Amino acid sequence: MKKNFRNTYNFNAGPSALPTAVLEKAQQELTNFQGTGMSVMELSHRSKTFEDVHNEAITRFKKLYAIPDDYEVVFLQGGASLQFSMIPMNFLTQDHKAGYIMTGSWSEKAFKETKFFGEAYHIASSKEDQYRSIPEISANDFDANDAYVHLTSNNTIYGTQWQAFPDTGQVPLIADMSSDIMSKAIDINNFDMIYAGAQKNLGPSGVTVAIIRKSLLKKANKNLPSMLSYQTYVDKNSLYNTPPTFAIYMLGEVLKWIELQGGLEAIASNNEEKAKYIYDAIDNSNGFYVGHAEKNSRSLMNITFRVQNEELEKKFLAEAAEEGFVGLNGHRSVGGCRASTYNAVPPEACLALSEFMKDFQQKNS
């Protein structure tokens, strides 16, 4: 089997694959960024050189997602996990509830944090079915007086993804898009807030992006510590304190790379092609491989499956590792296998995995 020059096929769930071209550019600029004689990691975050990097990343992000002027884009730290707390701190009040749609471990964690700050409830859940699907939601499932509705757009552990988002009317819709942000075009106007850790599709770990509607910001709690208030980041252009400068630089370079691929339309088409290689190997295996997610809820980012029996599964993972396939073990909480096919994972890696799967089945049937 032919491998790429980096000698691995990286299917890690996060931190995950980065575009080779971006890594090579970062390598070239690592010790002398734009003729400064310094690394971007050594620049003052108050310098014009870094501010240009910072502002360009925000501008590219807004352009790729066609973000209207009535939204703010901010860079935060603490990962999506800190947002689980910051969101109710800022937007949940005593006279309102927060509704959560439960589709996996990350929505469970978000819901758990919310209960420290106010009342929250489950709008719907697919837990009884081992999170194999995305629940169907109607306006009757939540209260029109809710502070917000929260969902997780893609579920890395169980391999499910929203195919169409619910209409919540006047109730603000907040989405954790950490694992499928920038994987396809979306209508930002359907959401009042989107947040995402960078380490899947946007760059290295260390920076979190939030897109927040200005009208939602006006409702935010004003009695919060500075670092836990979204308004602080808006007012200071995400430069209130020292930001993760290298992560922001890398995010900007990844966004440039997305543009060079043809934008989000081309990225989405590429992701569909990549996932099809692997799903076809599962669907055509006559039960040798068994996908976890129901077909109408399948993720294009995280493909989860089991091998026919536990002994063969261990053998599959061991032989795959020998062939250079990295990160195929399922999450420790559920086991099995998982191929994370984020934007930077090249089609040839997914094709190679599908060929390996077919070959392994043929030899072990």
Image (spheres, grey):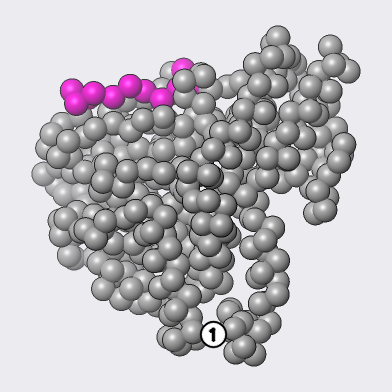
- Spot occupied by residue 196 in the image (x, y as percentages of width and height): 43, 52
Residue type at mark 1 is Leu
Residue 211 in magenta?
A: no
Instruction: Using residue 345 as the reference point, say whether residue 157 is left or right of it.
Output: left
Residue 332 is at least partly visible in this image: no
Question: Which residue does the image show at 60% across and 89% down from the upper left?
Answer: 36
* Nearer the observer, 101 or 66: 66
Give how far across and how far down residue 211 sits, in percent: 33, 56
In magenta, the rendered stretch is 129-141
Seen at 28% across and 24% down, the residue is: 137
Q: Residue furthest top?
A: 286
Looking at the image, is 60 positioned above or below residue 142?
A: below
Q: Residue at x 40, y 73 (%)?
A: 55
Where, by quadrant of the figure, is residue 77 drawn?
bottom left
Query: Mostly what secondary structure, the magenta segment?
Result: loop
At label 1, counting other C-alpha atoms closer than 10 Å, the crowd grade (few under 14, some 14-19, many 20 or more) is some
Q: Is residue 73 visible?
A: yes
Residue 133 magenta: yes
Looking at the rendered image, the quarter that the C terminus falls into is: top right
Residue position for label 1 = 43
Give me the residue at 35% from left, 37% from top.
151
Residue placed most toward the observer, 90 or 203: 203
The foreground one among 226 and 46 is: 46
Q: Position of residue 217 (x, y in %)?
A: 20, 59
